[in-house]
Amino acid sequence: MTTSGKKIHIRQPVLQVSVDAGLLPKSPVKTAATSTAAAADGKARINIVAPIAPKAVALRQTLRQQSVKAAIARVDAAIEANAVSPAEAKALVLALAAKSVGPGAAAEKWYRSHHLPEFNGRTPAQMVRAGALSALVAHMKGEASKPKG
């Protein structure tokens, strides 16, 4: 399934009402539409946008969760098929490491110099170069799911 790349927007109901122009805040920039509407009879027309319905909010959240799950499944499938380039593998490992050791330089230092006893003292960089990305990612996810303390 392909998408056009456009985001789905669920429309919100809008109600246009007339109010006393004196109740509205004074704006420094007057547009032709507001000045003529307010000057005609002291009334101004404003739009009231209804809040998004709870069902629409729940639908949006479900769609986001499904999208994230699909992206994770694609990455996992690429890892299992050894179809991940070394640069992508490094980026993935650094992103996972950033959750536990911190972003940026800390994750890079961990990637290059942290020896993993579970893998005979090899560093994550050595694991990636050796093509053992799936084992490394499984280990990192297992470490992240362990309770701390």
Image (cartoon, grey):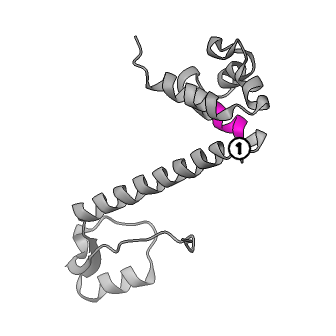
Q: As drawn, is 62 to the left or to the right of 130?
A: left
Q: Specify whether residue 52 is in view.
A: no
Tell me where residue 56 appears, x and y as whole percent.
28, 65
Instruction: Name the residue furthest bottom.
Output: 40
Quadrant of the rendering where the C terminus is positioned: top left
Residue at x 43%, y 75% (from the top left corner): 30
> 143 and 67: which one is in front?
143
**At numbered mark 1, what does the secondary structure look like: helix, strand or loop?**
loop
Q: As drawn, is 58 to the left or to the right of 112?
A: left
The image quadrant of residue 128 is top right
> 64 and 127: which one is in front?
127
Residue marked by disc 1: 82
The image quadrant of residue 106 is top right
Tell me where residue 26 appears, x and y as whole percent.
34, 66
The overriding secondary structure of the stretch rendered in magenta is helix
> 115 and 15: which one is in front?
115
Height in image: 2 above or below 74?
below
Quadrant of the rendering where the N terminus is positioned: bottom right
Q: As drawn, is 107 to the left or to the right of 144?
A: right
Disc 1 marks which amino acid?
Asn
Q: Is residue 2 magenta?
A: no
Tell me where residue 6 appears, x and y as whole percent.
53, 72
Q: Is residue 93 magenta?
A: yes
The image quadrant of residue 131 is top right
* Residues shaded magenta: 89-94
> 76 and 44: which one is in front?
76
Residue at x 71%, y 44% (from the top left corner): 82
Q: Specify whether residue 129 is in view.
A: yes
Height in image: 60 above or below 126?
below
Residue at x 30%, y 60% (from the top left corner): 57
Residue at x 50%, y 54% (from the top left corner): 70
